[in-house]
Image: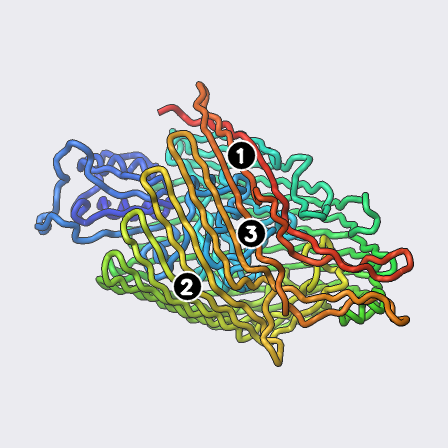
Amino acid sequence: MSLADLLRSLAASGYDILYSSDLVPADLMVPESLHETDPLVRAREALAAYHLTLRGDGQKRYVVTRSAHVEPAPRAANTADDHLDEVAVFASRYVFEDQASTVQSSFGHDDLEQVPGAQGDVMRAIRTVPGLANNLSSRPYVRGAFLEDVLVRFDGIPMVDPFHFKNFQNLVSAFDPATVERMDVYTGGFPVKFGTRSAATFDIAPREVDSGYEHRVGANLLSYDASTAGRFDSWPVEWLATTRHSTQKIVLQPTRGDIGEPSYSDTLGRLRWQINPSLALIAGWLLLDDAVASSADDPGAEQAVAHDRDMYGWLAAEWSPGGSVHSRSSLAVASSERTLVGALNLPGAATGTLDERREISTVDLRTDWTYVQTGSLMWDFGAETTFETTDLSFARTESLNPVLAAGLDRPADVTLGDARSPRSVVLGTYASLRHHWRRFEIEAGLRGDFQDYRGLATHSQLSPRINVRFDPTPDWHLYGSGGHFRQAQRVDEWRSENNQTAPDPATQVVELIGGVAHDVSSATHWRVEVYYNRWLSVHPYLDNELNRLSLIPELGPDRVLITPRGGDSAGVELSLRQSIGTDWVAAGSYVFSRSTDDLGNQDVLRSWDQTHAFNAQITWKRGLSSASFVVGWHSGWPKTPMTYLPASDGVPAHLEIGSRNSARWGSYFSADVRLARTVPLKWGDVLLWADATNVTNRDNECCSSYGQVDSAGGLRPPATASWFPRVLNVGFEWRLRPRR
């Protein structure tokens, strides 16, 4: 095997290797005396024979350099120049994305640990990414799209809904920093291999240790956790295992709200066996469990008991038979059980009960291949199939005050029962090519997708996409992308509450993106990006117009079905990252955007539209101490105006509801702080940290609480509720690593 082929084979092990053909010419061969099976160790030993070494950046990316105090490595006979003729990049997951037209936001393991609130949830670390909109939830809206339009992948496996408290704003994700090595966030322009989700891709790489081990035990006011990661010295096997459980007094209640004492736990494991330099096998699993029991102190409040349990398991094989071919094939199974039982008791206004149960099983098979035909031409192709079965049950009994129902434009009796078991088989194939010239790069791809809903309907779609990039100078980058996304409805997205009997046609979105990025120096980077998304068709969706903090939104008297004919989302994003000396890093973004639904004779703002949004983060790190400060501000989210009209002239008090989303709440602002200090000990070290979210304790208005009646049975004026108050959290983490 040539040394260049050995470096290419590292892609199958999850490493990104950059090297010059001047340092590693094609005629350098791997010494025959090497018998090491671990690919990274084998590569280091082979390079050392030619006085070369691997220099890492801590994120499984390495650059081949000359070893210190040695003569230059042997060169090929036809290599005459001293400059770098070529730099080759081989990446296990992001071959195209690392160097081509798409621009993603990447967060390494150390980056994730620096963000306030992210110690227990890495999804909170991405709040500074332009185009993301969230307040309470850990699951963001992206560029005006819907929540289900976002793909979350862990270890290359699609995760349907990896969040805790699904019935209450998806408050916590399944991933903490101990689980994650790197997270790449794509908010547009992603290639066809990422599937059909049209809004964004969150690609999460599992935590890995290059050598040795790292054991952790931690505790804070919200949870207890433990983890271990490493690789054996005598066997070519890596491991990762984490477990986490919430404390008894987890603080997740919004202001003037009470969801009792929620609890959650999750367990994740992963084993990777490098059988030989070209083949690796992976086994992984993820278990989620959470429960919410609302407080019984106020008999007039919503009462609910919710329990969710999710299980994921997967097997994968990564094969690199030669330096130009890489593949990954996987089998994944998932099972989810969700139960929500509750009651609403607003005497004289609304009374009802709810019993909703969902059981979902999924089997997913996929294979992805990359062929590097030449140094400037690469092909991606693959196929996937998914089998999904569901058992859905929805039973609601509810009656509304006739005056309240008339004001909300709903019938007084909204009782509903529905039980269905939709099934689906989904097939998908894709192919794309990437060609690189000296300053120009293009990637063009096409997806074909087919859904069989087992006796209900069959649908098929074609989705073309193209990405381009032009680098007029090494510091300036112009890029653009266009695509026609077609996203079919999964059967787990079935609207039982709406008595859905047949699958919706696939949502169709045309996306256009253009941007410019500039690297002023190695310490300064900025970019400006413009996007426009046009929904040619949209799935109907349910929304609570007045109170979006309801524990049981299905019983909300303000529950409405929105049936858009289409929609639009457009915006301009500006972002900047600046390193200041060796200790400080500043990053920020500003977004101007607009997201609407086409509701027949008018365009109506979507409930998560935010015209202006600004985020900034300042991080300081020196030695064993670090601090970070994050501020976020955005325009108030749209609201439906509501006027309380007191009783007059024999007419009882009632509510007058205005046009949907024609007004706005007050602007949202939050300031978060994190402080951390590492204390070295004889056995490992201890990380002590404290963070606070919404340190100013600002009341960020979110929704209206309504429907209460007085002793005479008349409606009372509505009250205003807010998002999170100030939340303080402190914790420690003991880490044990081998001494070096």
Residue receiving disc 2: 189
Query: Left or right of 262: which side holds 403?
Result: right
The residue under label 3 is which amino acid type? Phe
* Residue 638 coordinates in the image, percent (x, y): 61, 64
| Residue type highlighted by circle 2 | Gly
Q: Secondary structure at mark 3?
A: strand
Name the residue carrying label 3: 669
Q: Nearer the viewer, residue 427 or 44?
A: 44
Query: Against 458, is 168 above or below?
Result: above
Residue at position x 61%, y 59% from top? 388
Location of mark 1 (residue): 690
x and y percentages locating residue 292 in the rendered image: 71, 45
Task: Decide which of 527, 241 is in the foreground and name it.
Answer: 527
Going 38% across and 61% down the picture, which residue do you hit? 528
As drawn, 222 above or below 678: below
| Residue 463 seen in the current view | no
Name the image quarter holding residue 364: bottom right
Viewer-proximal residue, 59 or 229? 59
